[in-house]
Image (cartoon, rainbow, N blue to C red):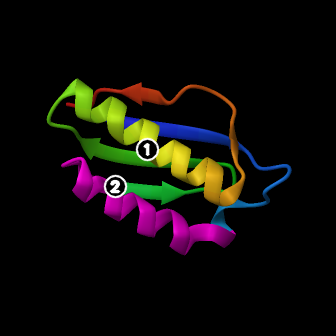
Amino acid sequence: IHVVLRADTSKSGNLLKNRSIILRHLQKLASDFQVKIYEHALVSNHIHLTVRFLSRDLYKKFIRAFTGVLARRLRIKWLLRPYTRILK
């Protein structure tokens, strides 16, 4: 699945300056929720992930945990719901 998380960075600043925090939480939560990360890309105001989830329930738990941690730690407000597209 391709996932895009878009953030309002007007108050928190660029996501790239917090790269290490984002990647640390991404790796930890991926192992907690059994998520396989194939690729990731950080852009100034959004995050791209190519991932595999074992179930829809684990997807919901991972997204909720990841976006929640980043919102608290980096004071990010997410603009939209996560955009997803199934890849073949």
In this rendering, position of residue 1 left or right of residue 70: left
The residue lying at 54 percent from left, 44 percent from top is 68
Which residue is the site of mark 1?
A: 65
| Residue assigned mark 2 | 29
12 to the left or right of 68: right
- Screen quadrant of the C terminus: top left
| Quarter placement of the N terminus | top left
Q: Secondary structure at mark 1?
A: helix
Q: Left or right of 85: which side holds 41?
A: right
Q: Position of residue 86 (x, y in %)?
A: 29, 27
Where residue 65 appears, as percent x and y from the top left, is: 43, 44
Judge whether 27 appears above or below 87 on screen. below
Q: Is residue 49 depicted above or below 42 in this figure?
A: above
Q: Main secondary structure of the magenta part?
A: helix
Q: Residue 87 at x, y = what percent?
A: 26, 31
Residue at figure coordinates x 63%, y 48% from the top left: 71
Q: CA distance from mark 2 to mark 1?
A: 7 Å
Labels 2 and 1 touching (C-beta < 8 A) = yes
Q: Earlier in the sequence, mark 2 or mark 1?
A: 2
Q: Which residues are magenta?
A: 17-38
Identify which amino acid the numbered label 1 is placed on. Ala
Check if residue 33 falls in the magenta segment.
yes
Quick one: label 2, few (<14), some, or many (20+) residues within 10 Å? Answer: some
